[in-house]
Image: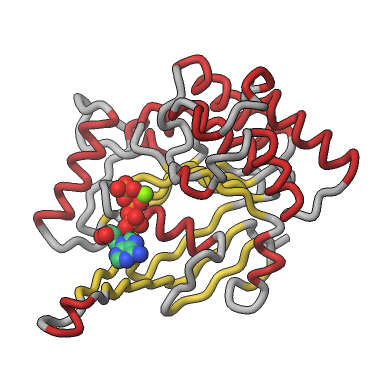
Amino acid sequence: MPPAIELKDISKTFTERNWKTLLFRKPVQTLALDNVSLTVKKGEIMGLLGPNGAGKTTLLKIISTLVTSDSGEGTISGLSLATQSLAIRNKIGMVSTNDRTFYWRLSGRENLDFFATLYNLRGTKKTKQIEKSLQLIDMEDKAESRFMSYSSGQKQRLAIARAMLADPEVLLMDEATTSLDPIARRKLLNFTNETLAKQEQKTIIWCTHNLHEAEDICDRVTILHRGKVLYTGKLDEISISESQNIEQAFSALVSFSQNAPFTDAEIALTRKKSI
Ligand SMILES: Nc1ncnc2c1ncn2[C@@H]1O[C@H](COP(=O)(O)OP(=O)(O)OP(=O)(O)O)[C@@H](O)[C@H]1O
Ligand SMILES: [Mg+2]
């Protein structure tokens, strides 16, 4: 069986063009991803960590086929990113913090109905999936209110419900717990780990700034920094010294690579268990 997600040497540069770049200066270029390779097994929760601007969201957009890479190749459930993007979209659910992708004047239920139709759900199956998704996020009582009246946490919950509608094989969670209260956050973490990953064998990329959250549910993590993969492996195996907690070890790893060009061999990762 092929890995659920396999990326090889993916690079992406954004070029910003506006009237100033047309008249006065060269377009600004940002290397968002630099030869990123990544393999995620079916049923695995892979954490995606890294400082602001590291390239995490760009990587998720490439996996979901919203953005195309400049070079490199990849497959999602054995389907090619380059030639089978439509088939890939049917297998992917994505949660992001961008609430502009909803219709503000429609209710939560109407929004879900609209997206369910886009996912080709019809009739009783559609109604059932919408109910199931609303139950999961505890929003049945708010389902008829307009999206514009929702609090940020409620908007985020609806984004989670939308991602679950089509029962996708691969879930891309981009800071999915942002704005969730502690109870909703815990419920989502447990549901992701126990139901989605363990029981239903869904493959999940969990992008977060919360290292404890990653420690809690991720089987492995990939740390990106300035578009490069700094580390892939178990989070509890990143440790520079015995006294460090996970946040200190993460900061040390990132600042090490910031201050000096790094190679794999230069990053001395000591294994906690062997200390
Ligand atoms: N559409 C775009 N046009 C120009 N530059 C972009 C675009 N999208 C992303 N970038 C740049 O690419 C880099 C990576 O951005 P990305 O959003 O992937 O980072 P991130 O790791 O998700 O950061 P954060 O943790 O803040 O969400 C950043 O320098 C960003 O400014
Ligand atoms: Mg991001």
Q: Tell me the residue at 23%/49% (across/down).
A: 268
In the displayed orientation, state which residue is furthest to the bottom. 23
Q: Tell me the residue at 59%/23% (across/down).
A: 190
Residue 216's place in the image compared with 250, above or below, is above
Residue 36 placement (x, y as % from top left):
40, 65
Indicate left or right for 86 with 32 as reference. right
Q: Tell me the residue at 52%/75% (across/down).
A: 73
Quarter occupied by residue 182: top left
Decide which of 77, 85 is in the foreground and name it: 85
Residue 186 placement (x, y as % from top left):
52, 20
Residue 91's place in the image compared with 82, above or below, is above
Indicate left or right for 161 with 206 as reference. right
Q: Quadrant of the N terminus?
A: bottom right
Q: Quadrant of the C terminus?
A: top left
In the displayed orientation, state which residue is furthest to the right. 124
Quarter occupied by residue 238: top left
Residue 228 in view of the camera: no
Residue 49 placement (x, y as % from top left):
36, 45
Decide which of 46, 262 is in the foreground and name it: 46
Locate ligand 1 by image quadrant. bottom left
Indicate left or right for 120 with 56 as reference. right
